[in-house]
Image (tube, rainbow, N blue to C red):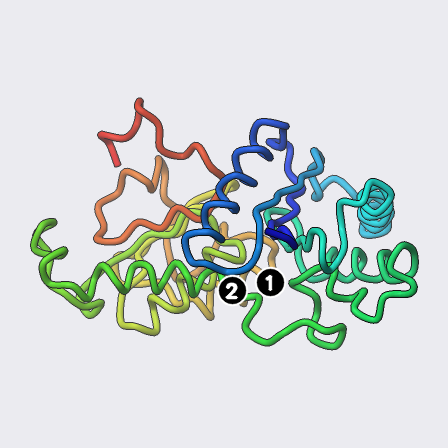
């Protein structure tokens, strides 16, 4: 089916095999829920933190031109989206580049990409959509008494604790929805450090702190956690970082 849908990620872990695997997953996901899209994926092997905004814009626009030249982007061909290392900013660059090049005569040129800023044709709720999906997936499981009895827990979010690995777009919004439902976040793991508070961590306070300081390290309402938070006891574990977090070597510890 066309158009194909899938994210564009900027990461040092990008390789051909990963892109092929993730595009296959997108194909299966679209087919299973029967949305009229095929699967796709793209990646650029860079660490966005090491580039200025101007450099990232040049990289993104050039990447868009190369996709357009090969016929790999367009409202009816392939419609990318944000992924790891990309967001609304990158999507607006892609949209603008396509609309002013190959899509110059297409009235729907801006539809060549999703995840755009609201003033440029984006839609409300897109930013939090992935985290909302994680929450609803957990909700389907946690609301079913027969499932919960299998793991020795009671239904409902009220008395549940959770740990989030990765405080990016997915981790933040999953944390928000779980917190709103009544669950208590006791730990957050990031690549530069972990924090823990058995009494609970407020997603709003942590988000404000990260925006101000660029990191969760040093957050005043939790203590630093040494070791791997994936192995800490909790009711719900949310792995919202990169893939390959669970392996045959550490599965029994989780």
In the displayed structure, would residue 236 be above or below residue 123? above
Q: Residue at x 23, y 59 (%)?
A: 141
Q: Would you say the residues marked 1 and 2 are in contact, meaning their CB atoms lie under 8 Å apart?
A: yes
Name the secondary structure under disc 2: helix
Spot occupied by residue 132 in the image (x, y as percentages of width and height): 43, 65
Q: Residue furthest front?
A: 1
Q: Quadrant of the C terminus?
A: top left
Spot occupied by residue 137 in the image (x, y as percentages of width and height): 33, 59
Spot occupied by residue 149 in the image (x, y as percentages of width and height): 7, 55
Q: Nearer the viewer, residue 211 or 162?
A: 162
Q: Nearer the viewer, residue 2 or 172?
A: 2
Query: Would you say 84 lies left or right of 78 here?
Result: left
Q: Residue furthest top?
A: 249
Q: CA distance from mark 1 to mark 2?
A: 6 Å
Badge 2 crowding class, 10 Å Cα cut-off, few under 14, some 14 to 19, many 20 or more, is some
Say which quarter of the image contains residue 89: bottom right
Query: Would you say 143 lies left or right of 50 here?
Result: left
Q: Nearer the viewer, residue 194 or 74?
A: 74
Badge 1 crowding class, 10 Å Cα cut-off, few under 14, some 14 to 19, many 20 or more, is few
Q: Residue at x 56, y 52 (%)?
A: 215
Q: Residue at x 86, y 46 (%)?
A: 65
Query: Would you say 152 lies left or right of 169 here?
Result: left
In the displayed structure, would residue 240 be above or below residue 33? above
Query: Would you say 124 lies left or right of 61 here?
Result: left
Say which quarter of the image contains residue 198: bottom left
Spot occupied by residue 219 in the image (x, y as percentages of width and height): 46, 57
Dot 1 corresponds to which residue? Answer: 211
Name the secondary structure under disc 1: helix
Residue 123: which disc? Answer: none
Dot 2 corresponds to which residue? Answer: 207
């Amino acid at each position: 089916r066309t158009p194909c849908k899938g994210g564009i990620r900027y990461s040092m872990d990008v390789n051909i095999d990963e892109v092929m695997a993730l595009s296959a997953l997108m194909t299966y996901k679209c087919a299973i829920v029967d949305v009229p899209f095929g699967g796709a994926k793209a990646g650029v092997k860079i660490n966005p933190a090491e580039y200025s905004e101007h450099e990232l814009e040049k990289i993104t626009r050039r990447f868009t031109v190369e996709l357009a030249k090969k016929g790999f982007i367009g409202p009816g061909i392939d419609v990318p989206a944000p992924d790891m290392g990309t967001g609304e900013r990158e999507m607006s660059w892609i949209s603008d580049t396509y609309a002013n090049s190959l899509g110059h005569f297409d009235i729907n040129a801006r539809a060549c990409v999703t995840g755009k800023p609201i003033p440029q044709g984006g839609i409300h709720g897109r930013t939090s959509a992935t985290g909302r999906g994680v929450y609803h997936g957990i909700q389907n499981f946690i609301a079913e008494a027969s499932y919960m009895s299998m793991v020795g827990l009671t239904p409902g979010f009220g008395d549940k604790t959770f740990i989030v690995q990765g405080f990016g777009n997915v981790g933040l919004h999953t944390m928000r929805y779980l917190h709103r439902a009544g669950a208590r976040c006791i730990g957050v793991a990031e690549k530069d450090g972990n924090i823990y508070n058995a009494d609970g961590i407020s997603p709003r306070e942590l988000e404000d702190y990260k925006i101000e300081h660029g990191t969760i390290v040093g957050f005043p309402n939790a203590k630093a956690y040494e070791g791997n938070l994936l192995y800490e006891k909790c009711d719900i574990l949310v792995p919202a970082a990169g893939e390959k977090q669970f392996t045959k070597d550490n599965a029994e510890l989780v």
